[in-house]
Amino acid sequence: NKEEAGFFGPSHAESATSFADQAAVAIENVRLFEALRAELAERERAQRELAESELRFRQLAENVDAVFFVRSVTPRALLYVSPVFEKVWGRPVPSAWGELAATVDPGDRERVSAAWEDVESGHDLEFRIARSDGSTRWLRLRAFPVPDGTGRVGRVAGIVEDVTERKAVEQMRDELVRTLVHDLKNPLTSMLASIDLLEAGLTGTERRPMAEALRIARRGGTKLRSLVDAI
């Protein structure tokens, strides 16, 4: 018997084949285990980074004077609004757009509603709101679309700032400019008209030196009026 004599026979071949199959399965299982462990480690790392990123975002959003918000496209709902909202609006964070739209000044509501409906474009607009205490505040809204993995807009993120003080300064500046222009323009017009009359009445030997003085006065007055007109 060749098997008894130490030769490699059919039974040995079957055993070797079976062992090789088992070894292959074991090796594949080890490979799959290592791949699974690596994937789990990567997911844990990604989750940690996401949690840290969300923590940083919330710390930023909750420690600045501007309102951060994130809203979904379908359905159109507010997903996140920073706590500063209550300070700016003087009321709790609304759960629906209708509640928020009701706080917008009627004169600005149409523009703000159009921006809310248009999720494909970014927006930068200013509008007024009525606070719960009856006061009016000017706000600046900047919003931009956030595409998902397929390139479609899935969310809209934005920031709202209270610009009431800036608008008040702008209004004061505009009123000051209007007053300044009015107070300068009328006297300048009268001065230039008077120069015309003086030039028309010049006679005799005094005409040349007086005409030169009037010419200088006219040039200065005309230049000053041009500056006032440009304000």
Image: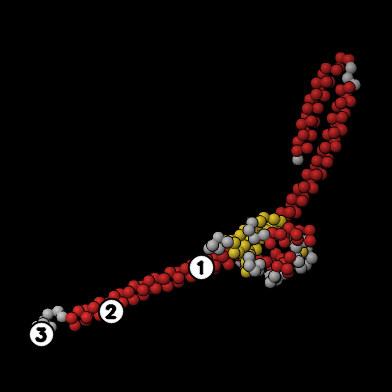
Distance between the Cα atoms at labels 3 and 1?
A: 70 Å
Query: Which quadrant of the figure contains the C terminus?
Result: top right
Q: Residues within 10 Å of mark 3 (few under 14, many from 20)?
A: few
Residue on which the image places disc 2: 22
Q: Which label's residue is closer to the chain start, 3 or 2?
A: 3
Percent of width and height locating residue 168? 75, 54
* Camera sees residue 190: yes
Distance between the Cα atoms at labels 3 and 2?
A: 29 Å
Q: Are the residues tagged 1 and 2 within 8 Å (C-beta)? A: no
Would you identify the image quadrant in which residue 104 lies? Answer: bottom right
Distance between the Cα atoms at labels 1 and 2?
A: 41 Å
Q: Which label's residue is closer to the chain start, 3 or 1?
A: 3
Most distant residue in the top direction: 205
Residue on which the image places disc 1: 50
Number of numbered labels in the structure image? 3
Residue on which the image places disc 3: 1
Q: Nearer the viewer, mark 3 or mark 2?
A: 3
Residue ID at (34%, 72%): 31
Q: Amino acid at mark 2?
A: Gln
Q: Amino acid at mark 3?
A: Asn
In this view of the protein, which residue sits in the foreground, 104 or 35?
35
Percent of width and height locating residue 214? 82, 24
* Direction from residue 144 to residue 229 in the image, left or right: right
In this view of the protein, which residue sits in the foreground, 22 or 218?
22
